[in-house]
Amino acid sequence: MTEQAGILEKAQSEFERAMQRNIKGLGYFTSPAPVVGPCVKDTLIARGTLRLYHYRPLADEVYRVPIMLVMATTNRGYIFDLAPGQSLVEFLLKAGYDVFMVDWEAPRPEEKNLGIDDYVLDFLPSCAAKVIETTGEPDINVVGYCFGGVLSLLWASLHPDGPLKSLVTFTTPVDFTKMELFQAWADKRFFDVDRLIDTYGNAPADYLLTVFDLWRPAGRAAATFRLWDNYWNDEFVKGYRLIERWSNDMLPLAGRYFKETTEQLMWDNALFNDRMEVAGRPARLSNIKVPYMHVAAEHDHIVPRPASEPLMGMIGSEDKTELVLKGGHVSLVGGANAVRRLWPQLDLWLQERSV
Amino acid sequence: MPETLDRAPRAFIVGNMTGETPKDPFTAFRDMVTQWETTANEWGNKMMSTPEAVQAMQMGTATTLKVKEATADTMAKALSAANMPSKADVEAIGERLLAVEAQLARIEALLTGRADSVAAVPVPRPKRTKTPPAKAVAKAK
């Protein structure tokens, strides 16, 4: 009898959920896309693809050293500022940091000739100089995500005399041979990067999105099922829409930049092999002497653990730390789990290096 | 049917036969979807890592590029015949506009003393004197 009652109760619950799915499912398709980036910010630089934002403080007293977040060039920076309560930026502001972010817009067709040198020797130094001018402080802490981390490493290695005070990178590859799926896709024998760039100018965003999707062929179908299954759960739907919006909002990559990253990093593995050059200047990770922290994700399918593992040995700093946290490439930095796992650890590490 | 695909329903049935508390069919179906996703992703990754699959994919890309090149070429000729600017012409104008924008930004910076800034409201400037909580410092040491 008890078992029968349990089954009936379960069936009733599923029926109610099914009703909710129908009602809320209709709402899903008729409601606008979720609003992202709730923290108030000022645009300090808007030059072509480059944006530098300064977030309005949320504390009466802040740490002396400002933080400059450097977003990956493939995606938009609002992964750091998804929604109230799900925003790394908001968390840092409330914890008393002065936060800036280097973000990217889609490069225009006429920006196809931008290369790694433009990002490392022009964009990042310009942003750092602007942060210094704005704050009046002589040094900054930098936090780079994914390829934003690679750019930060290159910039730091070429500017050993400052103004960097400490450096944090999230899910940042250094041994590109260990990004096996990308290696397979960019196989030198079959991939004609010159032709792609000659034809399109910039590497198209939908092309890049397809490449990312290839590594999880069942991902979209399974995610759609889970969304349908959870239509009754407002929190789930909200989180899903935020992450879904972000992951589909990919950016094209400037043509020469895409070609250089393919040739120098994917094919030559130049950063790992100490052969990396930016505008003819050797970029050696051993030149980085500032305090350094790298955070890797256990289940990262984009930058697998072995791709970032050699970083600790290659960086020249004496004060260096590595954290390996549960989560994937995106859930490490944004979403409900990041609030509990990464952000408090980041705050703890930055506190004493921000005075 | 691959083993992973039928694992969940079988667990439900076996649960009934052995007298164990059965998994409800909805949970079993959710588990099945998760297992299918894992298996399909693993299989897809294996397949996509083979030289044959990569070659086929890149051949597809190359064909698309050839078609696009041919279309662009034909369009450029047609536009030229109609005395209209081609995409390359528009891009060239775009590049010149970019240079003009950069020049304007420099002039604006000279005039206002605030390069590239579009901030309309004064930014609050809190004191930069915050120190780490004592506990964090002790732990770091």
Image (cartoon, rainbow, N blue to C red):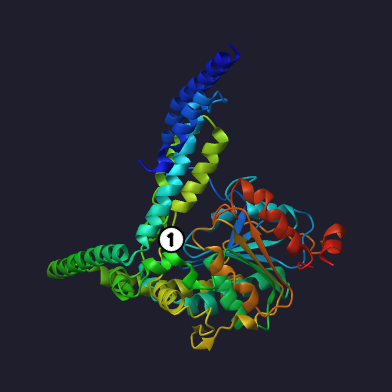
Q: Is residue B127 left or right of residue A236?
A: right
Q: Residue at x 51, y 74 (%)?
A: A119
Q: Quadrant of the C terminus of chain A?
A: bottom right
Q: Position of residue A312 (x, y in %)?
A: 65, 73
Q: Residue at x 55, y 67 (%)?
A: A306
Which chain is home to disc 1?
A: A
* Farthest-out residue, front: B18
- The residue tagged 1 is A251
Determine which quarter of the picture holds residue A43. bottom right
Q: Residue at x 49, y 61 (%)?
A: A302
Task: Note whether residue B111 is visible.
Answer: no
Q: Position of residue B64 (x, y in %)?
A: 23, 63
Q: Position of residue B126 (x, y in %)?
A: 77, 59
Inspect the image, locate mark 1, and give the three-letter code of the amino acid beneath it. Answer: Leu
Q: Position of residue A52 (x, y in %)?
A: 57, 65
Q: Is residue A243 left or right of residue A132?
A: left
Nearer to the camera, A161 or A45: A161
Answer above or below: position of A76 versus A179.
Answer: above
